[in-house]
Image (cartoon, rainbow, N blue to C red):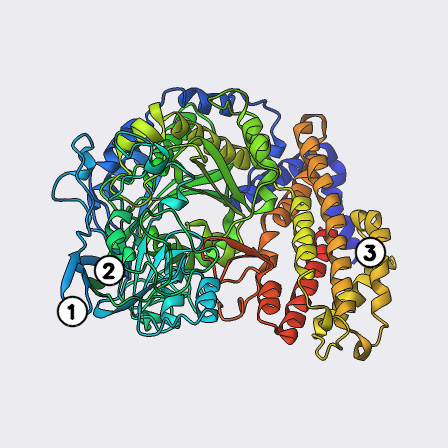
Amino acid sequence: MDEKINIYKAPKARNNGKGLKWIAWISAIGILFYFNLFNISISVFSNNSPKLNPEKIVLDSLETNLASNWSKIYTAEAHLAGTNYHLVEWTQEKFQEYGFDTTLDPYEVYLSFPKEHDLKLLNSKGEVVYTAPLKEDVIDEDPTTKGNDTVPTFLGYGANGNVTGQYIYANYGTKKDFELLKENGVDVKGKIVVVRYGGIFRGLKVKFAQDEGAIGVLIYSDPGDDNGITPANGYKQYPEGPARQESSVQRGSVQFLGGEGAAPGDPTTPGYASKPGVERQDPHSSIGKIPVLPISYREVKPILHKLNGYGKSIQGFKGELDGFNYTTGPSKYELNLYSLQDFNYTTIWNVYGEIKGEKSNEVIIIGNHRDAWIKGGAGDPNSGSASLVEIARALGDLKKAGHKFKRTIVLNSYDGEEQGLIGSSESGEYFAKKYQKEVVAYLNVDVATSGKNLKLNSSPVLNDLLLETAKKIDYPEGGSLYEHYTKNHKYIPTLGSGSDYTVFLEHLGIPSFDLGFSGGKKDPIYHYHSNYDSYHWMEKFGDKGFVYHNVAAKYLALLALELSERELIHFNLNDYAKGLLAYYNETIHKVPKKWLNEKIKSHPKFDLKEYNYMKEITSGEFVTPICKQMQMGITHESEDVNHHHDNRTLKDLLKHTQKSLKFLANVTEQYDFESQSLQSKFEHKDELPFWKRIKLYLQIKGHNKGLQYFERNFLYSKGLHTRPWFKHIVFASGRYTGYAGQNLPGLNEAIEDGDFDRLVKWLHILDGTVVRVGHHLLLK
């Protein structure tokens, strides 16, 4: 053995310098092969300073504003979900023109399309005294309202039916409104319900009416919800002025969206993608069984006038419709409501454009939907569509200039959003594993512009990025976009539902945000989902000169660039943890006092295991550098390990969970500090020897994975109670609101339902998750 070793070593001893040189070369080639094999960026090893200024190139490109051009194209033709393949091809061609690799992704989904409808008012003898036109006025100066290709007034997924019966007024049609009707002795069963838009998602108005035994629903827009911009206050109607056109009708989907038992996407394939040949299910857990029609406030007046003096006057039910005193009815009059739609399986097309980055397994997606309820859709969605094409143009110019993107950027143009977030939901379900593995963040733009006031909703990890980037953008009326936003908002709200970010955040656990410039209280009324959401309205009232389209494009492009190019992913975990603690403190104040001293009967095994593990860490048996810094903030947790579970009360568990949340806040503060430290080291990497760059690379790689997957940790595989599609335990669409979000939904729903055991269950889930996430970050 010794002789063989000596023989093996002899050549190295005789030619040591040459041998070491070969070893170094082989090692270097091996490292390079490793990085290329796993498609990993080697920028950490490069000594070359960047010659380009990516932000400047993007902003310079967008100094030329072509948003108006793209808006004209998108609003010139009707484009309901699953129709107008020409715009599919045009969008793909524009992405290709600007240097993106493109893909068309089709799905076979269950949709409804308008065929016939009718609405008649009948007197006590059954005679017709009024027939509603159920159509909007043609306006000579607005080309979008003319022609044979305008889309009829209808509500997607509204059931077919021909029903006749008395009718009642039910305010906004919220769950609370129906409870008030019941308290006041107003019987909904067998009636047609008339409700006004606002308060909650329109599909839930239908769901709640159906649950109470209604046979049909009418939904209208009340001037009382127009912030005083009404003819009664001296404002002229569109097109002469900023007030709502009285024949304006809001179309839309009446899918149940985030309601109990429901899920976004194709209602026949809940939780899985609608590709050809898949199993189909009964859709009625997500869509209704009663007919429903949208109607203008001019058309509804003769109907509601007949309720004057009948039924009850309920506080909070009053709007500003002239001639109606807002009593509930019923009266002696009846309605005959008829709706016929064509339900079928239809192909929709998502269009994807990609610029591949060095880190191809780290992806930023910017998404917008392309389908609209009307021929126009200048605000919804085509202000966003125009901005998306502008982003493609700017990023394409950056690519053309020779810039190598660090992370992959993908632009998604979805179909079928309006019917129920269908294109994005099906895509998210189909690519679930890929998205959860690769996507860093999802940036959503829907109605990019319908006014000049910036609104943001976001997962808190993105808040710092959003505010810092806003400082780089000029606001058209002076100052920066940051100054404009912070002047009008104290914080960035969290997300609910109602657009394509829903599947990314609430089903897949991917940090998401949504932006849009909207009108303020004194601004022109936006004709949402109406024929008057037209290019002409946008040009005259919504965004003269398409200035805010341009600002939205600049902002989104810089956000994507910052996420792509910064070596350490620009997330702030402490913002998330502090937000989580604030949501919790707000929630526990709602817990009934009589519950606090009740004994806890069930204790999941992970509870004790996690806390014993924490004791092991803090006792020094296994301590990382960050863990040492955090010991004093978490040693108190071990005291609960020896506490007899049989004696624990809800109050004990509430306090323990609060301590765990504070522990997470401490850990994330240190993790963010480490992010800044690593970013600083990267920016000075040229001063480091080669081996330290390798160490730095490995540190950054591990740290970035902690950032990228942080949000995923808050998914619960079984989903929310009665809503298994919604898997996020921190953020969800409100089950009674649809659009508006509800933080910590498991806890809040249990409290609302008076379910003590379910509250305990969700406290354990939250507590266990928070502790696990904190430990994971400590060990990174």
Of tags 2 and 1, the one toward the viewer is: 1
Looking at the image, is 137 positioned above or below residue 141? below
Amino acid type, callout 2: Ser
Give the residue number, with chain letter if any, for mark 2: 112
Q: Earlier in the sequence, mark 3 or mark 1?
A: 1
Can residue 457 be seen in the rendering of this structure?
yes
Q: Secondary structure at mark 3?
A: helix
* Residue 734 at x, y percent in the picture: 50, 59
Other-residue count near label 3 (Cα within 10 Å), few / some / many at <14 / 14–19 / ≥20: many
Looking at the image, is 605 positioned above or below residue 153? below
Of 251 and 472, the residue lying toward us? 251
Of 753 and 39, the residue lying toward us? 753
The label on residue 126 is 1
Mark 3 vs 2: CB contact within 8 A: no
Amino acid type, callout 3: Ile
Of tags 3 and 2, the one toward the viewer is: 2
Taking 473 as reference, is 682 left or right?
A: right
Of 384 and 610, the residue lying toward us? 384
Can residue 100 be seen in the rendering of this structure?
no
Q: Earlier in the sequence, mark 3 or mark 2?
A: 2
* Residue 633 at x, y percent in the picture: 83, 52
Disc 2 from disc 1: Cα separation: 31 Å
Q: Residue at x 54, y 37 (%)?
A: 563
Q: Secondary structure at mark 1?
A: loop
Q: Quadrant of residue 634?
A: bottom right
Taking 690 as reference, is 734 left or right?
A: left
Disc 3 from disc 1: Cα separation: 74 Å
* Residue 746 at x, y percent in the picture: 59, 65
Q: Quadrant of residue 117?
A: bottom left
Taking 358 as reference, is 166 left or right?
A: left
Q: Residue at x 18, y 35 (%)?
A: 139
